Amino acid sequence: MQSSNSLVIIPTYNEKENIENIIRAVLGLEKQFHILVIEDNSPDGTAAIVKALQKEFPDSLFMVERKEKSGLGTAYIAGFKWALQHEYEYIFEMDADFSHNPNDLPRLYEACTAKGGDVAVGSRYVSGVNVVNWPMGRVLMSWCASKYVRFITRIPVHDTTAGFVCYRREVLEKIDLDNIRFKGYAFQIEMKFTAYKSGFKIIEVPVIFINRELGTSKMNSSIFGEAMFGVISMKINSWFHKYPQKK
């Protein structure tokens, strides 16, 4: 097996238009990454495409197939546990649809390896608003959601809902992954909040987020509703919870 200390987790549901291109883009980088696809029984044949590519990349492309679509949070938790079991040191979250640029993966890696970060966040809002091809209403909703979460939680992060993230292994080992309760995009908030409360250093790396060109977005208003109302209960619960601390 080719060696790599870095694993990119890509959850998929109906991503046949994107999955081969994103896999080739990541595996074609100068810095070697491995990929773990968490496949939620896509009816469009996404899994078959990944299986075909595994013959070409047997040592760097892996897949976990789940029986049903069970939420973004549970997909990443499954990926995190797989990564820890297989002893990766740097574990990444990344979308399949090219809204996250594969060329930014080495920048997130560098933030953790060379700049002292425990968590590196590919941030749309740390240097203005860097979002392309989103309707203005959605940009405002996302930007306001991140500002709201930052105000409530006091996390020193501008893009609290970002889904382009690198975690050092120690962070995922310290967090009780089975107690992460949000399943949708609020999962991203809870993970950052828990890492922050556990004393880990979060670094934001400015990136440009480009809305998908192919396939269908899974975002909807209920996802933002979970983030808006769930973050209050998360904050209140934190007053009565003792977080394990970074060594």
Image (cartoon, grey):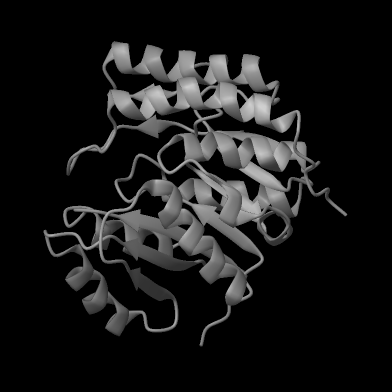
Q: Which of these two is toward me, 60 or 78?
A: 78
Query: How many marks do you count on the picture?
Result: 0
Residue 8 visible (yes or no): no
Q: Is residue 205 left or right of residue 64?
A: right
Which residue is pictured at 53% across the width and 16% down the height?
128
Q: Which of these two is toward me, 40 or 127?
A: 40
Residue 173 horizontal/vertical position (percent) = 70, 61
Q: Is residue 226 left or right of residue 77?
A: left
Residue 61 horizontal/vertical position (percent) = 39, 74
Q: Is residue 51 above or below residue 47?
A: below
Q: Quadrant of the C terminus?
A: bottom right
To which quarter of the image does residue 238 belong?
top right
Residue 239 horizontal/vertical position (percent) = 75, 28
Which residue is pictured at 32% across the width and 51% down the height?
96
To which quarter of the image does residue 36 belong?
bottom left
Q: Is residue 131 above or below residue 6?
A: above
Residue 42 visible (yes or no): yes
Q: Is residue 58 left or right of residue 5?
A: left
Which residue is pictured at 47% across the width and 34% down the height?
186
Q: Residue furthest front?
A: 240
To which quarter of the image does residue 135 belong?
top left
Q: Is residue 59 left or right of residue 190?
A: left
Which residue is pictured at 24% across the width and 53% down the height?
13
